Amino acid sequence: MSFPQYQTYRDSESEWLGLIPSHWTIKRFRHIFAESKEKITDRAVGPMLSVSGYRGIEIKEYDDENRRRTDEELENYRIVRPGQLVVNTMWMNYAGLGVSALEGHVSPAYRCYWISNEIEENYAHHLMRSSIYVEGYKKFLTGIRPNSLQMGTDDLRALPILLPPREEQKYISRFLDHETAKIDALVEEQKRLIALLKEKRQAVISHAVTKGLDPKVPMKDSEVEWIGQVPAHWLIGPLRWYAAIQGGIAKGKEYSSRDNLVSLPYLRVANVQNGYVDLAEVAEISVLPEEAQRYALRDGDVLMNEGGDNDKLGRGAVWRAQIEPCLHQNHVFAIRPNYHLSADWLSWFTSSDQARSYFYLYSKQSTNLASISSSNIMSCPLPLPPPPEQAEIIRYIEESVNQLDALMDEVQATTNLLNERRAALISAAVTGKIDVRNWQPSDSSADIEQALPMAAEEPASYG
């Protein structure tokens, strides 16, 4: 399938919109959208709405939160009616707007607009969330921090809105609904595949560190319910039998002006990821020379997080002395294995389902946070094969995980390409770079696969 272009184009007089079909018109936002200031009059206002993702409006069930709010606080919340354009001006660089098919309410960060009969609702949704409009919004955003940039009301009201004839808007909407649905289905397939690959990756690790590689080896009861049976010749005992633990340095300690301090890099919870150390941002801390020795990391230490979100709890990564000297904060434990235990074995074990269950079970839970003590970490039961077998299993895990990670990277690259092409297709249609007036729907996935590369290239040749 290929999409034709319109016969004639004219200058839109907007740098970021470029050329548009000659028979299309442009009006300012203020002439198409009229702000609705309908306020909450009671608490039966339906679900709270937000705008996120490329599909648009999402429902957020915040009823409990609304009951906790006072009537005075709720006075600033706005009612959303189906068919209204909902705009979060602070997130317009991430397409923080869309036409709602739902009735509900929004926080004071949002504005709601009735839509003129000159523009078809679905076309307006595609147009206002298109990548070319998102880039256009960015030119008007002001502020200091990236997450709080905002478009002023005057700039929004002056925004140029492309208006094909209304019947043509319906053709564009019909085309985009059909074609993006096919792309979305392909994206969902990729997401399911990634989920399956992640499950496989986790299963490989969890099985290898508790059952080994030989399916015929005699087994014994580990006497640990969440570990189950292990090979009969493996040891099993608390981590403290096979390693020592070193606590880290606490921030905020006060020193005398006479102290001879040294400034050194140190690792925080954010640096310790699942299976690797992220050194993109490494902070520094000023300490006494004797503290620098006390809290210094050694090559082969296994770093484990004391707390944070549940996914950060206890996760381990081997320190390879990428920075020397380097310290660690008190929320990161340094586990120092003895000659019985490979650092890589311990790191992989902390990634297993069995270890994750232990850390969760023995952690202290609070709202969205968890922490585990050093004594509980060192009491964690550890299945331990002989050192040569540890090395063999580690090689198997690394090879398997690398293969699965490579497959996930390929699938993610395909997903990214589909999303990019989806965005390009929408922008090409709503700005008239392609003419879809004579388009007819097809169920063939091959059609969209052939059409997408062209659509992705089209916008680049205009404006």
Image (tube, grey):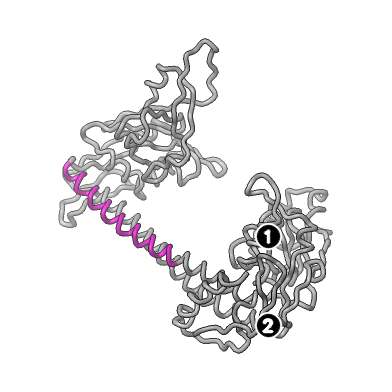
Q: Is residue 58 left or right of residue 406?
A: right
**Which numbered mark, 1 or 2, is in the foreground of this view?**
1
Where 345 falls versus 202 (above or below)?
above
Residue type of the residue flagged with mark 1: Tyr
Which portion, as a residue range, is magenta? 388-414
The percent coordinates of residue 154 (x first, y second) are 80, 58
Mark-to-mark CA distance, 1 and 2 = 25 Å
Of the two numbered discs 1 and 2 on the same chain, state the one appearing first in sequence: 1
Where 215 falls versus 365 (above or below)?
below
In the picture, which quadrant includes the C terminus?
bottom right
Residue type of the residue flagged with mark 2: Lys
Badge number at residue 137: 1
Q: Residues within 10 Å of mark 2 (few under 14, many from 20)?
A: some
Please report the residue visible at 65 percent of the width from the left and 70 percent of the height from the top: 18
Q: Residues within 10 Å of mark 1 (few under 14, many from 20)?
A: many
Q: Which residue is mark 2?
A: 170
Please report the residue visible at 68 percent of the width from the left and 66 percent of the height from the top: 98
Q: Name the residue nearer the viewer: 288 or 134.
A: 134
Is residue 412 highlighted in magenta? yes
Is residue 416 highlighted in magenta? no
Question: Dominant secondary structure of the magenta stretch?
Answer: helix
SS of the residue under disc 2: helix
How many numbered discs sit on the rendered protein?
2
SS of the residue under disc 1: helix
The percent coordinates of residue 148 (x first, y second) are 67, 48
